[in-house]
Image (cartoon, helix red, strand yellow):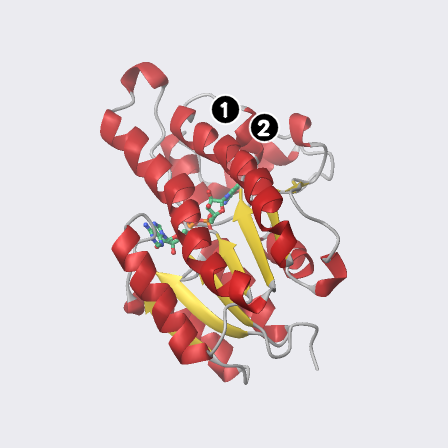
Amino acid sequence: MGRLSGRTAVVTGAGRGIGAAEAKRLAADGANLAVLDLSEERCQETVEDIRNSGSKAIAVACDVSDASQVEAAFEKVAESLGSMDILVNNAGVIRDNLSFKMSEADWDTVLDIHLKGSFLCSKAAQKYMVEQEYGKIVMTSSVVALGNRGQANYSSAKAGLQGLTRTLALELGRFNINVNAVAPGWIETEMTKTAAERAGLTMEEMKERFAKNIPLRRFGRVEDIANVVAFLVSDDASYISGETIYVAGGPSSSVI
Ligand SMILES: NC(=O)c1ccc[n+]([C@@H]2O[C@H](COP(=O)([O-])OP(=O)(O)OC[C@H]3O[C@@H](n4cnc5c(N)ncnc54)[C@H](O)[C@@H]3O)[C@@H](O)[C@H]2O)c1
């Protein structure tokens, strides 16, 4: 029996990267998974990995920035899996540029997916969580919440998520719902590969260059984040709420 046995979890943006690692880790701890991403096709690899390991998983296609798609997706999860115990808001994109060159569309896309998407999914999930008087919500912030050149949109969204975390913790605590955030440092995924390419570096060059400034002297792995999220959504963390946990190989301020 895993510590999440019998629980139902939704992980957004779980088709690859950190979200895929989180979905697999929660499944390994016993949860039934709703793997949510832009299309069912994008969810497939994660769903198959989870099913092959003997756990239950369904694919849910949904753009988290679209309110009607989110409503429909969460109804599908509740119908298919029978409850809504855990939500990990992880879906995200980057559209980096210096502020004076950043388009309004790139600002809107990033804010809509990270911040509005997390709000919409949390709103849809809390309806079920309040009724059952049990729930765990985790937001995905970033060390970039503290500011980063070329990421005004992303930094604002990630800082906003910390405010949303604290506010939802205040509003939902009385219903036995914990709301926390994880704030990763540099983690090796397709998203960071895109950032490396934009800076004219290969992933290996970026890892080597950044590792020198990280106190633990290594780039992060997706499992580093999945392990912390697995703790935050478990009852081992049942008296933690409204917190942002930096997972960055050192104090957050030294890692950007
Ligand atoms: N990689 C890092 O170094 C790092 C650091 C800090 C925070 N984060 C955050 O972690 C999360 C995951 O990042 P990653 O590196 O795994 O990225 P990734 O690009 O590898 O994966 C992101 C996933 O989100 C999905 N997605 C994008 N837009 C969506 C939408 N509108 N609706 C539903 N799904 C959508 C994508 O299809 C993809 O599967 C993001 O919120 C990111 O900002 C990443």
Q: Residue at x 50, y 76 (%)?
A: 50
Rendering quarter of residue 15? bottom left
Query: In which quadrant will I find the N terminus?
Result: bottom right
Q: Residue at x 72, y 36 (%)?
A: 250
Rendering quarter of residue 245? top right
The answer to whether one can see residue 213 in this image is no
Name the residue carrying label 1: 148
Q: In this figure, what is the number of numbered marks?
A: 2
Q: Nearer the viewer, residue 21 or 104?
A: 104
At mark 2, the secondary structure is: loop
Name the residue carrying label 2: 256
Residue type of the residue flagged with mark 1: Asn
Q: Nearer the viewer, residue 53 or 169?
A: 169
Q: Measured along the vertical axis of the image, is residue 99 above or below residue 141? A: above
At mark 1, the secondary structure is: loop
Q: Measured along the vertical axis of the image, is residue 33 above or below residue 242? A: below
Residue type of the residue flagged with mark 2: Ile
Residue 171: x and y in percent read: 57, 45
The answer to whether one can see residue 212 in this image is yes
Query: In which quadrant will I find the C terminus?
Result: top right
User: Residue 244: which disc?
Assistant: none
Residue 74: x and y in percent read: 38, 65
Kindly tell me whether mark 1's CB lies below 8 Å from ligand 1: no
In the rendered structure, are the residues bearing label 2 and label 1 in contact, judged by CB atoms less than 8 Å apart? yes
Residue 6: x and y in percent read: 60, 79
If you read the primary sequence from the N terminus, does the residue marked by circle 2 or circle 1 appear first? 1
Task: Tell me the CA gap for discs 2 and 1.
Answer: 7 Å
Does 92 sit left or right of 38 as displayed?
Answer: right
Rendering quarter of residue 152? top left
Residue 83: x and y in percent read: 50, 73
